[in-house]
């Protein structure tokens, strides 16, 4: 009798789980093997092997917004060349500047990064006190198992998520300058407009508009944080770019710079969907970092996130 009751209870619990499943975004974990469910959907965790490296090993997309470091000391005529440049820079710990709002870089790893519930991976930037240029971090699973980041992006929530002043689905369109040495004009999807200024004294390359963008305009979308930058001097000489609490790359955070250096640490367990509802991702395969501010600081120019590296922080050589 007791046994029958238990079985009935178990069946009930299962049914309840089944009902709730529709409201959740879950992905089956099938380490290294075929999907036992027999269907072809869902990512498969790629395990760490003896030859795995902690650092990202491929840049799939590098599409900066216009900026003073874009096309500077590198020539990329195609996305492929731009990615090769970015990968070489990350391998040697040098900055890749994502330009103004919305500029991004997408990288992958030779294994899936596991969601431990704690800090799972890290992004190296170049922030220091008074110079934070937050980048939103997004994660993706290779749901269709083709090795490419063509699946669903999930934003990692940070301290500003859901706050007034944070805009989801902000979009900025940048327009190709008509001649060398000109600022880059932009408009946004909120009726705003402005420019990424040409800084003739400091960055003298002909164009700040990426050479490998073929169109005469392009639009970048993402989450925008409210700008905090201000001129402390009152005469334009001392621009301060304050830190945000936590959850962003290239940010002088007191919370997630665990080793008090230029590296911010991230938790896959902070992933949210477009409605800001938590998403359970047991592991991820791709990371995107994207400039979160749409602002400029006088002679310092546009606020642009820099990425100098990314790594799985739970592998031995990075402990
Ligand atoms: Ca894919
Ligand atoms: Ca920058
Ligand atoms: Ca920076």
Image: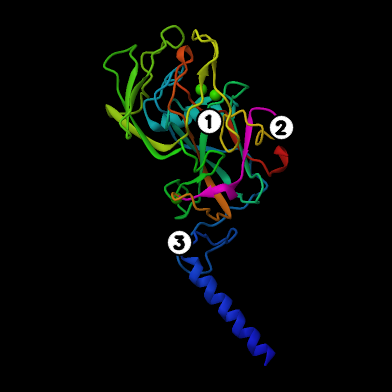
Per the image, is 266 magenta? yes
Question: Which mark identifies residue 245?
Answer: none
Q: Position of residue 260 (x, y in %)?
A: 70, 29
The C terminus: image quadrant: top right
Q: Which one is in front in this view, the residue at disc 2 or the one at disc 1?
A: 1
Q: Earlier in the sequence, mark 3 or mark 2?
A: 3
Q: Residues within 10 Å of mark 2 (few under 14, many from 20)?
A: few
Question: Which mark identifies residue 134?
Answer: 1
Residue 246 vs residue 300: left or right?
right
Q: Is residue 71 above or below residue 192?
A: above
The N terminus: image quadrant: bottom right
Q: Position of residue 153 (x, y in %)?
A: 46, 47
Residue at point 45%, 33% (across, down)? 104
> Label 1, label 3: how many angstroms apart (C-alpha)?
34 Å
Residue at point 43%, 31% (across, down)? 103
Q: Residues within 10 Å of mark 1 (few under 14, many from 20)?
A: many
Q: Residue at label 3?
A: 41
Per the image, is 277 magenta? no
Which residue is outermost to the bottom?
1
Residue at point 51%, 22% (across, down)? 229
Question: Which mark identifies residue 259?
Answer: 2
Q: Earlier in the sequence, mark 1 or mark 3?
A: 3
Q: Position of residue 29 (x, y in %)?
A: 57, 60
Q: Which residues are magenta?
A: 259-273
Quarter of the rendering containing residue 218 = top left
Q: Which one is in front in this view, the residue at disc 1 or the one at disc 3?
A: 1
Secondary element under disc 1, as helix, strand or loop, is loop
């Amino acid at each position: 009798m007791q046994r029958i009751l238990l079985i009935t209870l178990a069946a009930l619990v299962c049914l309840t789980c089944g009902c709730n499943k529709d409201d959740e975004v879950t992905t089956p974990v099938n380490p290294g093997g075929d999907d036992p469910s027999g269907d072809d959907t869902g990512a498969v965790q790629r395990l760490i092997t003896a030859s795995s490296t902690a650092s990202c090993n491929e840049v799939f997309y590098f599409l900066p917004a216009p900026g003073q470091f874009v096309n500077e000391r590198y020539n990329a005529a195609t996305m492929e060349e731009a990615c090769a440049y970015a990968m070489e820079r990350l391998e040697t710990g040098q900055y890749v500047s994502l330009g103004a709002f919305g500029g991004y870089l997408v990288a992958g790893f030779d294994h899936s990064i596991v969601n431990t519930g704690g800090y799972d991976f890290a992004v190296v930037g170049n922030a220091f006190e008074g110079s934070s240029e937050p980048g939103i971090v997004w994660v993706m699973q290779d749901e269709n198992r083709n090795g490419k980041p063509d699946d669903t992006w999930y934003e990692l929530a940070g301290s500003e998520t859901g706050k007034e002043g944070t805009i989801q689905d902000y979009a900025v369109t940048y327009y190709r300058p008509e001649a060398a040495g000109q600022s880059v004009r932009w408009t946004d999807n909120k009726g705003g407009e402005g420019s990424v200024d040409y800084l003739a004294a400091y960055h003298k390359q002909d164009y700040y508009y990426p050479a490998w963008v073929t169109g005469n305009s392009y639009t970048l979308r993402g989450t925008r944080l409210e700008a905090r930058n201000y001129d402390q001097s009152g005469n334009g000489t001392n621009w301060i770019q304050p830190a945000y609490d936590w959850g962003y790359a290239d940010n002088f955070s007191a919370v997630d710079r665990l080793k008090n250096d230029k590296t911010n640490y991230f938790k896959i367990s902070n992933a949210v969907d477009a409605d800001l509802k938590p998403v359970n991702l047991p592991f991820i395969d791709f990371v995107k970092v994207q400039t979160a501010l749409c602002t400029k600081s006088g002679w310092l120019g546009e606020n642009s996130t820099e990425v100098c590296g990314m790594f799985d922080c739970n592998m031995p050589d990075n402990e």
